[in-house]
Structures are given as C-alpha cells and as structure tokens.
Image (tube, rainbow, N blue to C red):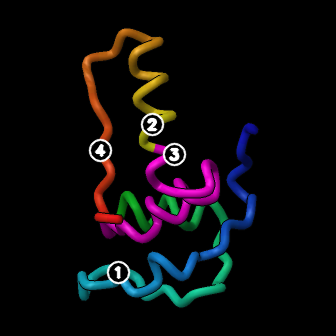
Amino acid sequence: HRLKLKEEIPIQSKVSFLGVNPKSPKFEKGEIFTLQGLIEAMLISSSNISSVSVAEYLEKDEKNFVNKMNEKETKNKANQQFIQIWPE
C-alpha cells in the first residue's frame, strides 16, 4: 500500500537492540514513530534501525523487503541489488 509521511510505524523487538552508533537516535521496542521521523533518522543520522523498522512494517520482515526490492529492480531493469544487512 502507499504510505503517508504521517503513518505510524512501530519499532520491532528485533531491531530495538541495534543502536550501536552513539550518534543514532535511541529506539525502544514498541515505540511508535511516523514514517517521516524514521526517514529523517535514516538520512540525518544513518539510522539502520529506522531502515529495518520501515522494511519490517512494509513486508513483515527484512528478508521479504529485500526480495521485493530486488524484484522491482529486475522489473525496472535497474542496475542495483539490495541485500539484507542483519544476519538471521
């Protein structure tokens, strides 16, 4: 579905412990942020937690999101490949 910037996205338990970069915002399991807030965290502080949270929200888990992005890449004949950043 098409997301809106004000859409609320929860932080999942899988990613809440990934705040290893001291410059990244701190996230706790169950916290809810808007899509806009998570995008800002991705762009301003390179927050991987934000990226994974959005991926999980859209496709239930990061692996499904990566597969979906690679399908779109193939369909659009782009020259990129997406990879999963956290081991299972």
Which of the two discs, 2 and 1, labels the residue nearer the N terminus?
Answer: 1
* SS at circle 1: loop
**Predominant secondary structure in magenta?**
helix
Q: Amino acid at mark 1?
A: Leu
Q: Report the magenta residues as a range.
A: 45-65
* Residue carrying label 3: 64
Percent x, y of residue 72:
48, 22
Query: Which residue has dot 2 on it?
Result: 67
Q: Which residue is drawn at the image coordinates 33% and 79% (left, top)?
A: 24
Number of dots carrying numbers: 4
* Residue 35 vs residue 29, the one in the foreground: 29
How many angstroms separate mark 3 from mark 1 (CA)?
A: 19 Å
Q: CA distance from mark 3 to mark 4?
A: 11 Å
Residue marked by disc 4:
83
Give the distance between the C-alpha atoms of the residues marked 2 and 1, in whole angstroms: 22 Å
Q: Are marks 3 and 4 in contact (CB under 8 Å)?
A: no
Q: Quadrant of the C terminus?
A: bottom left
On the image, the x and y values in percent for residue 68 come to 51, 34
Q: Residues within 10 Å of mark 1 (few under 14, many from 20)?
A: some
Q: Are marks 2 and 4 in contact (CB under 8 Å)?
A: no
Question: Dot 4: within a 10 Å radius of its alpha carbon, few (fewer than 14), some, or many (20 or more) residues?
Answer: few
